[in-house]
Image (spheres, rainbow, N blue to C red):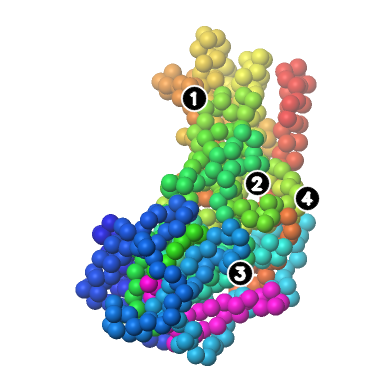
Amino acid sequence: MNKECMEWLNIVYKDHNPDPMASNASFTLSDTDVAELCAVATANELQKTSRGNGTGLQTIWSGMNAFAEVPVIDDANNNCISVTQQHNVGNGFAPRAPATWIKRVSSDHMRRGTAVCVSDIFSEDLCAHSQPILAEPMKLDLKPDWRADSCNFLNGQRIDAHYVSVDVWSTKALFSGSMCTPLCDPRQISMIVQSGRGVLQSPFGVLPFESGDLVQVPPHTPFCVYVQSGHVVRAIVYYSKHDLVFPDAQLNVADLNQAPFSPSIVMQCKYSFSEAHRLQSRGEYVRVQQSNGGYACYFFEHSCTAFNWLQWAHNGPLLHKVSLSRNFERIGSNKGHKDPNIWLILRHTNDVSFGVAFITGTSLLRVGDSEQGRVTYPPAYFHLNGVHEKGELVMFDRSGEAYDARKGFNEGDCLLHAAGVGHGGDKDIVKFFICKAMVKYILQHSKCEQMLKTMINQNQWQRFMNMEKVQRKQRIDAYVCKMYATNFSAHRYDDAQNMECNVQHAINMAMNVILNDHQPMHAGDALQALGVPFGAGYLLVECRDVPIIPKPKYNSSFGRVKAVSYGMEVATLVNDANEYLRKLNEQNFIRSTL
């Protein structure tokens, strides 16, 4: 425990990138000071009466004194006057409302002085500069185009959507600088870390973060963000006036009532301590809600440090996190939803129609075990929703494989589908699977011999006919499984040719394998991959009311929108395939089934 605490505190006080917004150098402490704080923080952690289960009082030491105290001379505090401040993180005195109370060394309200209003992304009127919602798929460019080295958590974000009806803001973050001055926001903050690592510090302790983490900061909780030296943080951040919480079950999917995150893997902040004797002040940023629904950001230059508590009691949320890449619990079933790895990870406490879902990981299913005996496929299926959908690709592992459901859809790209507008897979991906479906149908058809005679050369056809029927069926079935399996390399599709030519080419490829006795094939060993490759993820937000999409500004490419053809021209492929099937049908071979 002491080693872990020392590692995290070293990032806070020594091993972090400088704060580009700070007028002075970042706070640094000597090895001796860090070691002393580490010893105190470790002792405090061991003395907690409850450990991160979210229920009951959680105190730094038992027998805590009452919070309301008259000024006293504190012998333990260098014989200084101790004036306490009660800091309530929660919903005040609302019945049964979770809250966390802090008792500080002294009230920072006595020392703040005059506040200065600073520029902030939430001060702008987004409604006056919003983009129209189109009746076809909209592709948003949400790749950050600003410099990371001049930004920290406060100024290194841009708003990409505002869900007005549920009071949720979505931003993209890119920064390498630490935010050493605490920020206090009245909303809950949920941050999905795409890359980078560092430590969050709050009055309740410190919490490390790294790529793949989903971190949540409770409302009205002052916190700092320290980026470890040499790292750059890229993240997706949600600001919510009402809490976004982990769902208890996946109630919208049949037979899938598991929770996405086991309580045992939710990590809460640890190692609380007071730094007041070493750092007398930090300043503080405070966002204040305005009557028009916006937020103004104020800077208190001479604010007392926010991390100077004496005691605190917990019966509500703390800084906590889960890992979307390591600890994500997958469904492991293909019932109810085409993609077996989709989870609702955040639900809105006041509006059940708003949710954030996440798709990650690849499930391997035996081909014969898929839905109703049919082979399904990874590309996004075609559907129509009664809610608005906003989906984007998230890359955690740069060396990982990309999500290839849509051609030309890369990290930083986002799709917005208006409610009632049909959408789905990309023609350039689906064409391979239509071709596979036709190959499978021809090879396993009762009149396979007659059809193949018109597609392959005489020598291949004769060798095929000379095979024993049992062996022939085994190798055909094994090839079909292999064709849909993880290790199957899709054949080339010639866009200059029609479906008939491409299917005949695929049939010739199939026969080269089926007739090769030296190539072992086992149908039972072939598995099909469904989902998104590890290291990547697909983040999906659904909402009943349309979000505000801000216009790009300052000649920036961030937020640019264009209509895309994803889902279009698939009908042309199907018609082409049906035309070929009708041609075969004229020869009394098969009936059209597509």
| Label 4 crowd bin: few (<14), some (14–19), many (20+), radius 10 Å | some
Q: CA distance from mark 2 to mark 1?
A: 29 Å
Residue type (three-letter) at the residue carrying disc 1: Val
Q: Is residue 395 left or right of residue 573?
A: left
Residue at (63%, 76%) from the top-left corner?
289
In the rendered view, tell whether residue 159 sits above or below residue 109.
above
In the rendered view, tell whether residue 567 sits above or below residue 169.
above
In the rendered view, tell whether residue 26 sits above or below residue 355.
below
Mark 4 vs 2: CB contact within 8 A: no
Residue at (71%, 33%) from the top-left corner?
577
Q: CA distance from mark 4 to mark 2?
A: 19 Å
Dividing the image into 4 quarters, which one contains the C terminus? top right
Residue at (74%, 76%) from the top-left corner?
128
Q: Position of residue 232 (x, y in %)?
A: 42, 67
Residue type (three-letter) at the residue carrying disc 4: Gly
Dividing the image into 4 quarters, which one contains the N terminus? bottom left
Indicate yes or no whether the magenta region holds residue 286: yes
Q: Secondary structure at mark 3?
A: strand
| Label 3 crowd bin: few (<14), some (14–19), many (20+), radius 10 Å | many
Q: CA distance from mark 2 to mark 3?
A: 28 Å
Residue type (three-letter) at the residue carrying disc 2: Asp
User: For mark 1, what is the residue?
Assistant: 513
Q: CA distance from mark 3 to mark 1?
A: 53 Å
